[in-house]
Image (cartoon, coloured by chain):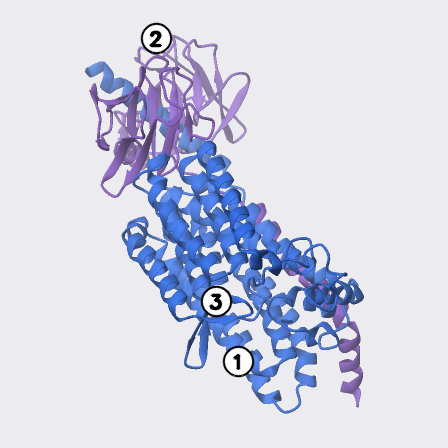
Amino acid sequence: MDFEFVFDFIESSSRYLLAGLALLIIGSCVFSLVTRHFGSRVGSYLVETKTNKKIPLTRWENSIGRSPTCDVILTNATVSRFHAVISKRRTGWVVADTGSRTGVFVGGEKIGKPVKLNHGDKISFGTARYEFFDVDVDDLEREKERARMRQARAAARSPMRVPTRAGNDSVGFMPALIDEASEKAYVLGCDSCIVGRSPECDIKLRYPTVASKHTKIYKIGNSWFIEDLGSTTGTKLNARTVSAGRRRLKSGDIISLGGAIFVFNERYKIRRK
Amino acid sequence: MATNGNGQRRQSQTDLMQQAASKSQSSKPKRHFRWMTMLLFATMFQLISMMPVMVNAEESELEIATVFGGFILVEWLYFICARAFAKQRATELEIIAFTLSGVGLVTVASVNPDYALKQFVAILIGLAAFIILLAIMRNVEVISALRIPVAVAAVGLLGVNLVMAETVNGALNWITLGSFSIQPSELVKVAFIFVGAATLEKLQSTQSLTRYLIFSLGCVGALFLMRDFGTALIFFSTFLVIAFMRSGDIKTIGLISVAAVLGAGLIIYFKPYVASRFEAYRHVWEYASEGGYQQTRVLSYSASGGFFGLGIGNGRLRNVFASTTDLIFGVVCEEWGLVVGFCVILCFAFVAVYALRLARHARSTVYSIAAVASAALLLVQLSLNVFGVTDLLPLTGVTLPFVSRGGTSMICSWALFAFIKSSDIKTYPILEKQMDE
């Protein structure tokens, strides 16, 4: 008998429940669809020869022309409204002329049929000159770069012999800057070190881009900080310029002193001789 | 040469550092679609709507219970398998499709229990088509290779239809095979978009349109001969969308449209029976018991449903001819209420918005065209159906996607959703992972 009451209640309220549920289901699905975030991947890019401007190509087929409906809009007067299409095939990138008046030139030769594009090819649409770069080839280079970086980090962690007066062979940890290219370590021996080319500096770096007194690395409490000393080439921490004031340093941070790259390691393992 | 090498190295170093910087920035958590919660809500919605139908069905209670149970089981199986084996998280489109299919299934079963099983089988085939198409659409090379066979099959199917079809409700678009009758024009819709999207070779050139134009003319012409004007109009508007997306050329498309309007005018002038079919349009109340019978009933009965409806099974529109196919929107409004009716419309409107956003971010033009053309087709079909029964447009007898009774229509709707879903990189987690790297 009790169940009948429940059943009646559901039956009488089902109209409202149905409407509410429909709104809820459809509403949240639709909201999720419409607000979805799409990432895009740059597959290749064109670099304008004159201005060095980089134009990323994010799709598998990129229409190029003067028309505002193109993926890549060029303003050059010799470019047709629908000039060419650069597209990705399984074999690589291909450029096709889509009935342009002034033609497409790859490596100085006018193309008829679609032509394969290689990394670094020179390509012109009318008189607009560009160079083509394939990101996958770039990626290969970057992968090599990354491998070197890993090596540098591994080297930063491995023990290194530092001559000290004491004859003990104990292992200790010191903060250090490790040159990414040569894997040479510069141990920060004091709590406030001036880094630069000048012989007065605590850490002397013989790099052409490093200023005589370039940057200061110092310790407050248990944390390390970096501060630029008004160098002309600048200091960067993880690709961001250290402009005014200090920035906190952590192990594994990448420091650029005017283009020379260092990895900071707070607990660099050294073995005393 | 040496300086150049140095410069390149310098550049890749800065790139490397930018990467390090962006890595530290992009640590905020991603928001995922809560598919399990939504699935639970959808199941609740379906169970509540199924209850009165089960109570009212006296003799065929067991059959209906089996069909409804099977539907919910298939729904859960799909979502669990999709999550487990294909790592699908973004399954909004499937939730929408299953919800709408559920509304259709329940309405159809409540009007006549005999329809229930057929409709359920149609949903199953539709789901299978959805999964197969998602697999095919993954690879652009496969799409290009299948283009011509699909086009030939589509034209062949329409030809067979013209020869074999029987006239049903004034249109020649049914083929009967044993106990099944199929509507080839619905299947050709899928082929039409597939062929239109597969255009990797010659993008944005007017010449490349010519072959597709001939194919389209064949399709639309065949539909005219079948006197299926609603579907012909759907094909034509889809053609306009695809033609624009392929060529970007507004002038040619304007010319084609003008030619089409002139052609339609000529047909109406020389073949008066065409116009006579739309005689009641805008005058439904004058022909309330003849040509305007269905429209007037839809208007007055759906108004009597109010916001929350009369309850499933309590309406009167269900007794009008074609209540489960062309007029199903009226039945939903009367019995389920205007809120649910509006939800159905909103789905397609926002799926179209989603498709437009997808088009801008899709990895290849194939996907942009497929998504936008599918969404446009669904939207046009929905408008023709909803505005047709409410006398804002002539009643052309097209189905309401996912909801109306009809096997081929259901399969077509699922297939079109597959086109939209395949454009989203999230559908293929492996490809998405490659992109992130």
Q: Quadrant of residue B401 in the image?
A: bottom right
- The image's mark for residue B381 is none
Mark 1 or mark 3, which is nearer to you? 3
For the residues labelled 1 and 2, the Cα–Cα distance comes to: 90 Å
Q: Secondary structure at mark 3?
A: strand
First-in-chain label (1 vs 3): 1
In-front residue for pair B278/B196: B278
Q: Are marks 1 and 3 in contact (CB under 8 Å)?
A: no
Q: Secondary structure at mark 2?
A: loop
- The image's mark for residue B172 is 3
- The image's mark for residue B117 is 1
Query: Do tags 1 and 3 sit on the same chain?
Result: yes
Give the percent coordinates (x, y) of residue B56: 70, 85
Residue furthest front as drawn: B270
Which amino acid does the dot numbered 3 rest on? Leu
Which amino acid does the dot numbered 2 rest on? Pro
Q: Quadrant of residue B323 in the image?
A: bottom right
Q: Which chain is purple?
A: A
In-front residue for pair B119/A24: B119
Q: Is residue B50 above or below residue B247?
A: below
* Chain letter of disc 1 in the image: B
Give the percent coordinates (x, y) of residue B28: 54, 42
